[in-house]
Image (cartoon, helix red, strand yellow):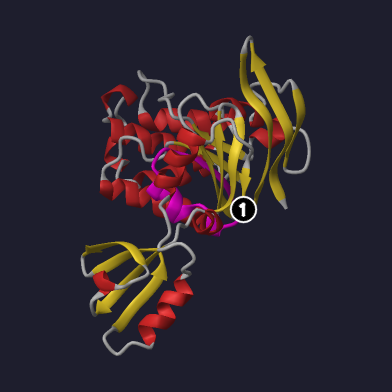
Amino acid sequence: MNSVLLEQVSKRFGETQAADNISFEVQSGEIFGLLGPNGAGKTTTIRMMLDILRPDNGRIAIFGGPMTEEKKNQIGYLPEERGLYADQKLMDVILYLASLKGMDKRTAVAAAETYLKQLDLWQHKDKKISALSRGMHQKAQFIVTVLHDPDLIIVDEPFSGLDPVNTELIRQMILGLRDQGKAIIMSTHQMHQVEAMCDRIVLIHRGRIVLEGAVDAVRRQFAGNTVEVSGTGPFDQLPHVQLSEHHNKTWHLTLGEGVAPNDLLRELVNNDAYVIEHFSVALPSLNEIFISIVGENGDDNPIKS
């Protein structure tokens, strides 16, 4: 079932077209990457999904229909900006915000204790928010986002300010929520996290979707005529290779025009001078694709996979 559906959604602020005919859907049990450079229209799109802003045209369906107050209690939102009450104690803030989502106090206290201990914040529960480090504040905001067990979770830069240990902890928690069947929308500039975590993505640039599809399909779509090979043999002397580079016992071979990876593999297998341990088509990273699309395809037709 679609947890989120956008159909031809647009929003203009004066002369700025913040969202231009945006369409996508988010399924339960997936992590959906909402990507784009600063100012692309991601935040406007999220705010329209949350009914903070109303679109100029188009349709947005949340859990199969229009947003309602009851549905808002099924949503958890982690904004990029810090938004907790700085002069209040951590536990008090968590319980207050949980009450706004309809949680009774006993359930909220039990859930808060579990999350605070899991994220190594239990000993800080009576500290004011202003006394927490940036990383602690981020973890506290994550707790507030998921404490009420929402079915739709939207996280904007969820790893901001976190050290590698806490980044991995939050990452595993997000993956666990996905495995529980939650629909998760993740907006981040950390492309390696998108590559590792997201099932599907859309890339928004200047208010328009310029790239969309499953992560693996997108990477295959942008794969050039380059292969990765490891083994033994004079790989730098192959006649059909335009460029060869050797890194950490792996050769990156750019093939000449008209030469397919299967052609090279067949040649290597049939040549006793080579022993092949690994052979694969080299896939570009999402970071490389992001830079390429944003830099060169901002106003071209959308690319779909």
Q: Is residue 220 left or right of residue 235?
A: right
Residue 168 among those drawn in magenta: no
Q: Position of residue 119 (x, y in %)?
A: 34, 46
Mark 1 secondary-structure assignment: loop
> Residue pushed farthest top?
14
Q: Which residue is mark 1?
A: 305
Q: Is residue 86 visible in the rendered structure shown here?
A: yes
In this rendered view, identify the residue nearer to me: 200 or 227: 227
Reply above or below: 278 against 192: below
Q: Is residue 303 left or right of residue 86?
A: right
Q: Is residue 206 left or right of residue 224?
A: right
The region drawn magenta spans 178-198
Q: Amino acid at mark 1?
A: Ser
Q: Position of residue 153 (x, y in %)?
A: 56, 42
* Residue depicted at x 38% and y 74%: 279
In this rendered view, identify the residue nearer to me: 254 or 170: 254
Q: Position of residue 41 (x, y in %)?
A: 56, 27
In this rendered view, identify the residue nearer to me: 117 or 171: 171
Reply above or below: 109 against 206: below
> Residue pushed farthest left?
248
Q: Residues within 10 Å of mark 1 (few under 14, many from 20)?
A: some
Q: Is residue 229 left or right of residue 234?
A: right
Q: Position of residue 229 (x, y in %)?
A: 32, 72
Q: Is residue 114 visible in the rendered structure shown here?
A: no
> Residue pushed farthest front?
239
* Residue depicted at x 31% and y 31%: 126
Number of labelled discs? 1
